[in-house]
Image: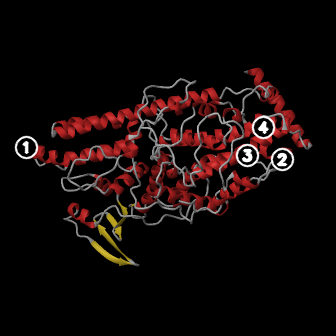
């Protein structure tokens, strides 16, 4: 379907700048009616990577979490192989960002003579005004079976009905607030009750704001077992046998949607204890627990290999040469266009990297940023990993891409070569927009607007900037990035009705997504004056995170090019000081302040080289 963005019609496919290194026909832009190759089947990683090996040349490790479907949570059958909120959004439709959120600043609209910084995930100091009521966690029919001894009180409020069931308050059948104890009890399955799917995802995601996951799991498992005790050993065994499939289903949804919670050995111990307990009750459930644990271990193993590979590649990329030596030897140094001279192909490979790294971000990492700190978090151990490490690695990739763009532009000695690189990256950014890869688009714009690049006036005078200005307009931060949000909604609508994997690609501007979630958390209280938890806020947090889960599960349909990917993730890039010095070497200082800056940078970098 055609895009619904204001400037989509102005973009056309970019032609090659030279011979295509890949020797295969290139598909047209995804906003045009095109066909794409079917994605290859995915499998788990077979081993760790060496620094010289490209991790993006290997299929994704967790396809089973991307394509599985979920049966009804209230059905009587056993659902051990279903996933929770990973394979699709548990809410009926994607939710737009709140128009009430405050505008944020961004470096995407810098002029050629101004200084801009690389976008990061640092949370702003301002906050949003609040959250809105969202979908229901389940009707009152579910609650009646659990609260049949509590009289439900209802009253008219505005245009809807507000009702209280014990310590849980509803408005128009949507859960709006409850005590922590009531929310935990509401998560516990019984013989004739299983929590609504959207409630399971929402509470498992946001409960870490109030207690640690291992505390929640311990209490849920304990309550599930204790509720079946009657004093008669035989009767207890029969009752637990009936509830065991639903407990296994809940644990399966937990392990498949939030597997990183189980990097904590306390979680694994609790899971092991429940496996032993289930083994005494019902063999079918015990086998399901074993299969679930095997899938979990496989997923955590793939995660460990991914993190080791990224760390090794980052170490290789940090071995950058000094700017002056590189400038003098730039004639012998390869550049991005020697690795790939086709903008569309490079945009495809960037999309591979984006989707690969997105797929390893756990949904809980968005909430862990401002969740309670575990006092044991800093202790050494196999599972003691930073709880937001993959989110941070993805933000670092954005910054690396921005600096890579700036390095490639500042490196060439000749002005016409620098202008050619600028035009090439403009076309790459254009193709990223057409694909729906907004994160790479913004990283490229940010790199081209960095001060060392923006000051190259003689170089920019040789560049036709019409397309670049259109792209900047799309990512304009004014009015809370209203143009970008319009483009994002258009890409999301296209994704919902897509007939091919290529049309399903939506890669958001990630730092803005983090800021939106930060605003929502900071701008709306988690607890109400009566001591209840504000569940309206938790619904809203879950909506934004669950939409991200839909986007991250897309399998990239483009062919991988090992050489291009290797270049993008390992090529050394300049630091900020090295970029400024390279810029001054390309186009000399224009005033005394720039002359002093160049002199200082030369002395500083020379001293740094001698020390190393």
Q: Residues within 10 Å of mark 2 (few under 14, many from 20)?
A: some
Q: Residues within 10 Å of mark 3 (few under 14, many from 20)?
A: many
Q: Residue at x 22, y 66 (%)?
A: 150
In percent of width and height, residue 99 lies at 56, 65
Q: Secondary structure at mark 4?
A: helix
Residue 29 placement, left or right of 327: left
Q: Of the residues tagged 2 and 3, which is closer to the observer?
A: 2
Tell me the CA gap for discs 2 and 1.
86 Å
For label 1, the residue is 234
Would you say the residues marked 2 and 4 are in contact, meaning their CB atoms lie under 8 Å apart?
no
For label 2, the residue is 462
Q: Of the residues tagged 1 and 3, which is closer to the observer?
A: 3
Q: Of the residues tagged 2 and 4, which is closer to the observer?
A: 2
User: Which circle's residue, 2 or 1, is located before the other in the chain?
Assistant: 1
Q: Secondary structure at mark 2?
A: loop
In percent of width and height, residue 418 lies at 79, 39
User: Which circle's residue, 2 or 3, is located before the other in the chain?
Assistant: 3
User: Which circle's residue, 1 or 3, is located before the other in the chain?
Assistant: 1
Tell me the CA gap for discs 2 and 3.
15 Å
For label 4, the residue is 410
Tell me the CA gap for discs 1 and 3.
72 Å
Would you say the residues marked 2 and 1 are in contact, meaning their CB atoms lie under 8 Å apart?
no
Please state which of residues 45 and 238 is positioned toward the viewer in this rendering.
45
Q: Of the residues tagged 4 and 1, which is closer to the observer?
A: 4
């Amino acid at each position: 379907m055609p895009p619904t963005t204001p400037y989509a019609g102005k973009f056309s496919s970019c032609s090659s700048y030279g011979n295509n290194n890949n020797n295969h026909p290139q598909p047209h832009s995804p906003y045009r009616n095109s066909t794409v190759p079917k994605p290859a089947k995915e499998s788990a990683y077979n081993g760790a990577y060496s620094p010289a090996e490209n991790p993006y040349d290997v299929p994704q490790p967790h396809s089973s979490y991307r394509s599985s479907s979920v049966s009804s949570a209230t059905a009587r059958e056993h659902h051990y192989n279903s996933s929770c909120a990973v394979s699709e959004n548990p809410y009926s439709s994607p939710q737009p960002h709140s128009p009430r959120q405050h505008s944020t600043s961004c470096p995407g609209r810098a002029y050629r003579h101004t200084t801009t910084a690389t976008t990061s995930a640092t949370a702003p100091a301002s906050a949003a005004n609040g959250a809105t009521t969202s979908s229901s966690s389940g009707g009152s029919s579910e609650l009646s079976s659990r609260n049949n001894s509590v009289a439900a009180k209802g009253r008219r409020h505005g245009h809807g009905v507000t009702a209280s069931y014990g310590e849980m308050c509803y408005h128009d059948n949507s859960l709006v607030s409850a005590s922590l104890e009531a929310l935990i009890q509401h998560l516990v399955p019984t013989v004739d009750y299983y929590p609504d799917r959207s409630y399971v995802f929402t509470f498992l995601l946001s409960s870490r704001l109030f207690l640690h996951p291992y505390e929640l799991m311990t209490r849920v498992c304990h309550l599930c077992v204790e509720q079946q005790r009657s004093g008669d050993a035989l009767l207890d065994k029969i009752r637990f046998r009936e509830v065991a499939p639903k407990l296994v289903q809940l644990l399966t949804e937990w392990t498949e949607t939030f597997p990183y919670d189980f990097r904590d050995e306390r979680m694994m111990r609790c899971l092991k204890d429940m496996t032993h307990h289930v083994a005494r009750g019902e063999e079918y459930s015990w086998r399901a627990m074993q299969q679930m644990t095997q899938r979990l271990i496989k997923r955590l193993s793939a995660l460990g290999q991914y993190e080791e590979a990224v760390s090794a590649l980052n170490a290789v990329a940090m071995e950058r040469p000094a700017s002056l030596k590189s400038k003098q030897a730039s004639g012998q140094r390869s550049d991005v266009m020697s690795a790939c001279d086709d903008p569309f192909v490079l945009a495809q490979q960037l999309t591979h990297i984006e989707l690969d790294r997105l797929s390893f971000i756990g949904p809980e990492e968005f909430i862990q940023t401002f969740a309670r700190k575990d006092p044991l978090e800093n202790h050494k151990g196999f599972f003691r990993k930073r709880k937001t490490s993959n989110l941070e690695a993805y933000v670092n990739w954005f910054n690396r891409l921005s600096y890579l763009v700036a390095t490639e532009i500042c490196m060439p000695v000749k002005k016409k070569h620098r202008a050619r690189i600028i035009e090439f990256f403009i076309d790459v950014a254009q193709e990223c927009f057409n694909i729906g890869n907004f994160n790479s688009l913004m990283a490229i714009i940010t790199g081209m607007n960095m001060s060392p690049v923006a000051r190259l006036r003689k170089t920019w005078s040789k560049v036709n900037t019409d397309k670049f200005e259109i792209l900047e307009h799309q990512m304009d931060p004014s009015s809370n990035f209203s143009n970008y949000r319009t483009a994002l909604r258009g890409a999301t609508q296209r994704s919902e009705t897509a007939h091919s994997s290529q049309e399903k690609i939506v890669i958001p501007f990630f730092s803005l997504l983090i800021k939106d979630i930060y605003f929502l958390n900071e701008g709306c209280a988690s607890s109400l004056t009566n001591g209840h938890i504000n569940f309206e806020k938790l619904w809203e947090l879950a909506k934004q995170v669950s939409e991200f889960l839909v986007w991250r599960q897309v399998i990239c349909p483009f062919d991988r090019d090992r050489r291009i990917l290797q270049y993008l993730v390992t090529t050394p890039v300049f630091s900020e000081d090295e970029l400024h010095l390279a810029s001054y070497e390309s186009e000399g200082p224009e005033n005394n302040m720039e002359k002093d800056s160049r002199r200082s940078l030369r002395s500083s970098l020379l001293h740094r080289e001698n020390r190393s």
